[in-house]
Image (tube, rainbow, N blue to C red):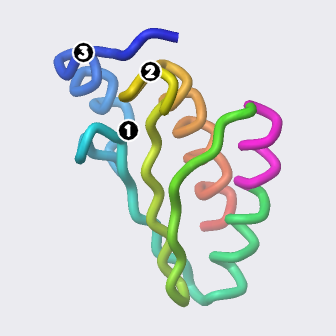
Amino acid sequence: MSKLSEDIIEKKLLHFPDWEFRDNTIYAEFEFENFKDCFSAMSRIAFECEAQNHHPEWTNVYNVLKISLSTHDADGVTQKDFDLAEAIEEIVEVQE
């Protein structure tokens, strides 16, 4: 999978208002009502990551989940990252 140009990334991000281009990744923060809801979303995201064979860099503190996506083999953002971001959005939306 080939690395996307910054222009293409910015255009694609128009469809992902919770995400931004940061440090050669697409990045988002999600806040949940409590730790249990955040961890539940992380568990569901983990299953999707395995299904797509693509894994985020993420951190969790209490009810906040921070996610960075990039394709390490391409040294940047690819369509694979946007596919996973879309799945993450659907999972997080169900939680709300």
Q: Residue 60: say if magenta.
A: no
Query: How much space separates mark 3 and mark 1, taking CA atoms?
Result: 17 Å
The image's mark for residue 4 is none
Q: Mark 1 highlights which residue?
A: 16
Residue 89: percent from the left, percent from the top? 55, 47
Secondary structure of the residue carrying tag 1 is loop
| Three-letter residue code for mark 2 | Ala
Q: Are marks 3 and 2 in contact (CB under 8 Å)?
A: no
Furthest residue to the top? Answer: 2
Residue 45: percent from the left, percent from the top? 71, 53
- The residue depicted at 69 percent of the width and 65 percent of the height is 41
Q: Mark 2 highlights which residue?
A: 74
Position of 7 relative to 26 (above/below)? above
Compared across the picture, whether 80 is left or right of 69 comes to: right
Position of 2 relative to 83 (above/below)? above
Q: Nearer the viewer, mark 3 or mark 2?
A: 2
Q: Quadrant of residue 54?
A: top right
- The residue depicted at 24 percent of the width and 15 percent of the height is 5
Query: How much space separates mark 3 and mark 2, taking CA atoms?
Result: 12 Å
Q: Which residues are magenta?
A: 45-52
Magenta-drawn stretch, dominant element (helix, strand or loop): helix
Q: Nearer the viewer, mark 1 or mark 2?
A: 2
Quarter in which the C terminus is drawn: bottom right
| Three-letter residue code for mark 1 | Phe
| Three-letter residue code for mark 3 | Ser
The image's mark for residue 5 is 3
Residue 23: percent from the left, percent from the top? 24, 46
Compared across the picture, whether 16 is left or right of 82 comes to: left
Q: Earlier in the sequence, mark 1 or mark 2?
A: 1
At label 2, counting other C-alpha atoms closer than 10 Å, the crowd grade (few under 14, some 14-19, many 20 or more) is few
